[in-house]
Image (cartoon, helix red, strand yellow):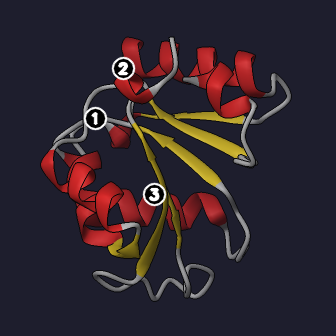
C-alpha cells in the first residue's frame, strides 16, 4: 500500500499510529515506502479509540494547521466509524465501498473544511480516495 501510494498525489506530513505492534509495523512500512523523513508519533490512546477520541487526537496532532495532512494508523471499528462519520461527499462508488467494509490496510483520504478550528461536523468531509489492498494492481 505504501509503495502504491508513493506513486500517487497523496501528501502526508505526519504519521500518528497506535502503539499496537501491528499498527506500528504498518506505519513504519508505509513511511519507508512513501517517505522515510515523515515524522511519526505513537499514541496509546489510538487503541480502541472511538470517533470522538480519534477526532480529538487528529486535531491535537494538527495543532491548528489547516493543511496538516495526517495519516492515522489505528484500529477498527473506530477507524471505519470515523470514516463513516466524516463522509459527506465524494465518488458514490467509493463511498458505497467504504460504507460496506473498511478492511485492514485500507486508506481513506478526506478533505476536512473547518479542521483548523476544530469544527468538524458529521458528513462534513469530502472523500478524496478510498483504497483497499485488494484494489491494488498485481
Give percent across and percent down for residue 127.
Answer: 44, 65
Marker disc for residue 57: 3
Please say if 120 is above or below 16. Answer: below
Task: Categorize mark 2 by other alpha carbons within 10 Å: few (<14), some (14-19), many (20+).
Answer: some
Sooner in the amino-acid sequence: mark 2 or mark 1? 2
Answer whether labels 2 and 1 touch (C-beta < 8 Å): yes
Residue drawn at (40%, 12%), measured in percent from left and top? 21
Please, what secondary structure does the residue beneath circle 1 have? loop
Question: Contact, CB < 8 Å: mark 2 with mark 3?
Answer: no
Cα–Cα span, label 2 and label 3? 16 Å
Q: Position of residue 67 (x, y in %)?
A: 73, 70
Above or below — where is 132 with respect to 121? above
**Count of numbered labels shown in the rendering:** 3
**Earlier-in-chain disc, 3 versus 1:** 3
- Give the residue displayed 35% in from the left and 43% down from the top: 45
SS of the residue under disc 3: helix
| Residue for badge 1 | 75
Q: Is residue 66 left or right of residue 58?
A: right
Q: Earlier in the sequence, mark 2 or mark 3?
A: 2
Amino acid at each position: 500500500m505504501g509503495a502504491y501510494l508513493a506513486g500517487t498525489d497523496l501528501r502526508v506530513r505526519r504519521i500518528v499510529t497506535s502503539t499496537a505492534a501491528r499498527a506500528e509495523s504498518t506505519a513504519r512500512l508505509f513511511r519507508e515506502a512513501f517517505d522515510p523523513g515523515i515524522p511519526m508519533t505513537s499514541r496509546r490512546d489510538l487503541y480502541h479509540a472511538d470517533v470522538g477520541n480519534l477526532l480529538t487526537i487528529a486535531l491535537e496532532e494538527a495543532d491548528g494547521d489547516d493543511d496538516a495532512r495526517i495519516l492515522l494508523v489505528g484500529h477498527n471499528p473506530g477507524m471505519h466509524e470515523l470514516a463513516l462519520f466524516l463522509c459527506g461527499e465524494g465518488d458514490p462508488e467509493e463511498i458505497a465501498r467504504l460504507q460496506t467494509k473498511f478492511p485492514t490496510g485500507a486508506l481513506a483520504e478526506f478533505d476536512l473544511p473547518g479542521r483548523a478550528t476544530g469544527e468538524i461536523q458529521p458528513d462534513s468531509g469530502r472523500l478524496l480516495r478510498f483504497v483497499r489492498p485488494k484494489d491494488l494492481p498485481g
